[in-house]
Amino acid sequence: MAAQNNAPLPDGLEIAGYRIVKKIASGGFSIVYLAYDGDGAAVAIKEYLPAALVQRLPGQLLPTVAPADLPAFRTGLKCFFDEARALAGIHHPNVVSVRNFFRAHETVYMVMAYESGDTLQDYIARQRSRNSRVGEAFIRSVFVQLLKGLRTVHAQKLLHLDLKPANIYLRTDGSPMLLDFGAARQTLNQDLPTLTPMYTPGYAAPELYDKTGGLGPWSDIYSIGAAIFACMVGAPPQPADQRRSDDKMAAHFVQLQGQYSAELLQLVRWCLVLEPLERPQSLFALQKVLAALPLSLAVLPPVLAAQQAEGIPARMLARLRAALPQALRRWLGHGAANASAGAVASTRGGNVATTVAGSESPRDPPATRQ
């Protein structure tokens, strides 16, 4: 992604009834500002300004686009506008609230709620700095709620396509919220023009690397599995394009045994299957399984959970197999056993590829994440 080197709008500028206070973040596609509305309430305003396509110098308000880049800019502009319109129609506590959107200065702006809290990435980093791990009960609570919000997004024919801990916001009350749909340039409506989605290695489904499409709910489901894995390990999984030629993920799941319940580990493995049709095909199916996982190990301290890991999972597995979809039953049965056998042979295959990307200020508002 190109770095944003365009000049931001000047502080104090009045635009569509909002007063710009300052720039608070920027990314390859946009610049985000802290602003106040007519009632004096703080909001975050996101300006569509793709760094690779436009230029805006200090003192200018209008971006300059080279003639050769106009088609791509206009396609992205339409997708950004459609995205804002779709999100403005979504009212869910686990999805960032888009309050308004408008056209100005030959581009599009999205007005979002300004809330206090930390990203999940910040939370993971703090836990790691204390030599602690993210607990299973916490993981389940956060992701069950996130799946509810994401189901609402998918119902609007919109994919996120950049799900990762940096785009999952934890409010001060602990409730999670999905944010930064800026990578969602691909909708479920194939009649709309699209841009090649931006993606984050490790969290991106393998089909995002392909030019042939094939994106769907299963693509976000891969990223959900990757985000849960990052909670467990403190880093994203091995990038999908590398896994296609030399998959080293099995060894990491072997190392996680005893730290998390067998059921949760197999659920993450199911989400991270490289073949899209072998993953959960809907968020509802994934949410149902995640909510059904037993709490026995999730609420135990790590030492006690490890001590009881041998006896409990067998009973859990027997109770769950009858209720779970066939694909996951296969993972919990012979498929998981074969994968574990292969993992033992490849335990020396290397560490997780990269650490979680450096986070921004932990008190930035949700809309500041790019």
Image (cartoon, helix red, strand yellow):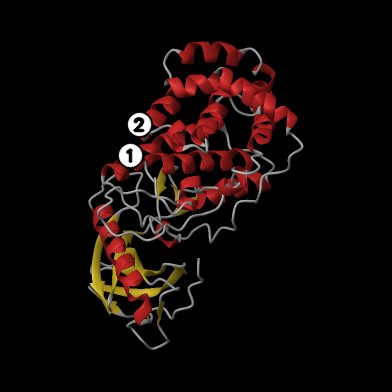
The kind of residue tagged 2 is Phe
Tell me: residue 58, above or below residue 212.
Answer: below
The one of 234 and 161 positioned closer to us in this rendering: 161
**Which residue occupies 61% across, 43% down?**
243
* Mark 1: secondary structure: helix
In this rendering, is residue 127 above or below 310?
A: below
Residue extending farthest front: 212
The quadrant where residue 45 appears: bottom left
Badge 2 crowding class, 10 Å Cα cut-off, few under 14, some 14 to 19, many 20 or more, is: some
- Residue visible at 51% across and 29% down? 267
Identify the residue shown where x is 37% and y is 74%.
21
Q: Is mark 1 in CB contact (under 8 Å) with mark 2?
A: yes
Amino acid type of the residue that numbered disc 1 sits on in the rendered structure: Arg
Return the x and y of residue 175 as percentages of the image width and height.
41, 42
Residue 50 falls in which quadrant of the image?
bottom left
Q: Is residue 147 left or right of residue 243?
A: left
Which circle marks residue 284 in the picture? 2
Q: Nearer the viewer, residue 41 or 317?
A: 317
Residue 360 numbered mark, or none = none
Nearer to the camera, 334 or 17: 334
- Residue 142 position within the rendered picture, expressed as x and y whole percent measured from the top left: 45, 38
Name the N-terminal-most of marks 1 and 2: 1
Callout 1: 10 Å neighbours few (<14), some, many (20+)? some
Q: Is residue 30 visible?
A: yes
Q: Does residue 24 sit above or below 298 in this rendering?
A: below
- Relative to residue 38, is residue 247 depicted above or below? above
> Where residue 254 sits: x, y (%)?
68, 29
Q: According to the image, label 1 marks what residue?
A: 151
Q: Quadrant of the C terminus?
A: bottom left
